């Protein structure tokens, strides 16, 4: 989501060294954005030597030499790489070299404000984290509503959430939220969903958003759709919603009610999901499974069948496999 922190030499292509790569050599070259170069004509910012490389596909590991330039892996080779002018050479003999891990469910929405390095994830090899899962995000709600939504669900002290939001919130929309996070000294890459509960509470008010009899007015439905559209244009990967009923609100006014997203009727969700579908973005959701009481004395296989048939429409497979969008400020790579 943020700009790269890797300060390497700029890549200058040299037409004399451009070559066509046979298919059996393709796996030696990872960065397909640039023309491949013969090993002896390449300079690197970092070389990792003789580490046992795991490519993340489940294929057998192998000892490899890895060349990195401008924050990108550009070559993985069984042959030694020329370290002329290389700024950093790491001897990884006897060590494992793994692709960065993507943590798709973190709820770091509050923590990233007070501790943007997220070092507890980085030191375990996580290079990208997702925010905004389960209908929870901090894009639109204020500190008090954020505390009521996050407090019991994520076991975060209510006063901690309020202070974090009130101290750091400088944004009023999705684009400004991205800019605010990019200004923080981030550790890993970030990508995010915008939370349905966040949008619903900010639009309807938390009290109305958590009452069964209340429905968003046409103007409020339109406002949530604008919020989602703005977030998708800004670079959010999609929207998260929630249908599980065991997550409860904190606070005094709405305490022990379920999350705002759980009160949405199918029409409200369909209109929001249609925006995701048209944009080719992702819906992340916690589904609920309703099993008819008549199936209590049936066999487990019948329970599974009933649960599958009763899966709500909001529990859909992702509409896109991307974790980043092709445009917008969150498309810029980090090192």
Image: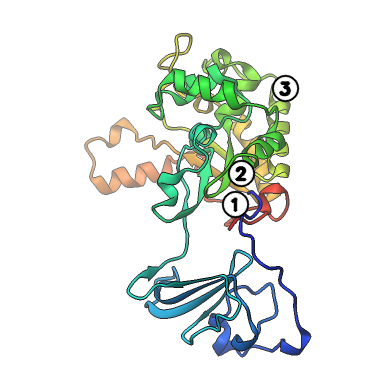
| Residue matched to label 1 | 319
Q: Is residue 265 visible?
A: no
Foreground: 91 or 133? 91
Q: Residue at x 57, y 70 (%)?
A: 87
Cβ atoms at labels 3 and 1 below 8 Å apart? no
Front residue (pair 45, 17): 45
Q: Quadrant of residue 251?
A: top left
**Outermost residue, right side:** 15
Q: Residues within 10 Å of mark 2 (few under 14, many from 20)?
A: many
Left or right: residue 169 versus residue 104 is right
Labels 3 and 1: the sequence-earlier one: 3
Q: Provide residue 278's location: percent of width, then percent of height.
A: 70, 48
Whole-percent x, y for residue 130 in the image: 52, 45
Choose top left, top right, bottom left or bottom right for residue 166. top right
Q: Residues within 10 Å of mark 3 (few under 14, many from 20)?
A: few
Q: CA distance from mark 3 to mark 1?
A: 26 Å
Question: Which residue matches tag 3?
Answer: 218
Q: Position of residue 158 (x, y in %)?
A: 44, 19
* Left or right, 326 with reference to 197: right
Is the C-beta separation of discs 1 and 2 under 8 Å? yes
Q: Are marks 2 and 3 in contact (CB under 8 Å)?
A: no
Does residue 272 appear left or right of residue 243 in this picture?
right
Please determine whether, in this image, residue 137 is positioned above or below residue 121: above
């Amino acid at each position: 989501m943020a700009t790269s922190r890797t300060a390497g030499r700029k890549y200058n292509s040299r037409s004399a060294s451009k070559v066509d790569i046979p298919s059996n050599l393709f796996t030696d070259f990872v960065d397909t954005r640039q023309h491949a170069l013969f090993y002896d004509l390449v300079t690197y910012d970092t070389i990792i030597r003789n580490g046992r490389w795991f490519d993340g596909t489940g294929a057998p590991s192998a000892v490899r030499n890895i060349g990195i330039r401008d924050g990108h892996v550009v070559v993985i080779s069984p042959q030694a790489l020329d370290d002329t002018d290389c700024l950093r050479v790491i001897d990884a003999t006897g060590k494992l070299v793994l692709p960065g891990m993507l943590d798709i469910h973190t709820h770091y929405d509050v923590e990233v404000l007070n501790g943007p390095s997220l070092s507890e994830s980085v030191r375990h090899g996580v290079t990208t984290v997702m925010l905004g899962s389960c209908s929870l995000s901090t894009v639109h709600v204020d500190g008090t509503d954020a505390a009521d939504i996050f407090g019991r669900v994520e076991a975060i002290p209510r006063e901690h959430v309020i202070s974090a939001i009130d101290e750091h919130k400088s944004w009023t929309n999705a684009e400004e939220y991205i800019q605010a996070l990019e200004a923080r000294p981030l550790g890993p890459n970030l990508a995010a969903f915008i939370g349905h509960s966040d949008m619903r509470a900010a639009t309807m008010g938390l009290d109305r958003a958590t009452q069964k009899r209340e429905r968003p007015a046409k103007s409020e439905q339109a406002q949530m759709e604008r919020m989602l559209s703005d977030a998708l244009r800004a670079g959010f990967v999609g929207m998260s919603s929630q249908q599980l009923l065991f997550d409860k609100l904190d606070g005094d006014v709405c305490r022990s009610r379920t999350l705002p997203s759980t009160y949405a009727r199918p029409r409200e969700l369909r209109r929001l999901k249609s925006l995701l579908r048209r944009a080719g973005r992702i819906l992340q959701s916690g589904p609920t499974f309703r099993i008819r009481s008549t199936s209590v004395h049936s066999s487990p296989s019948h329970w599974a069948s009933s649960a599958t048939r009763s899966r709500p429409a909001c529990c859909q497979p992702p509409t896109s496999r991307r974790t980043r969008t092709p445009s917008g400020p969150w498309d810029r790579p980090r090192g």
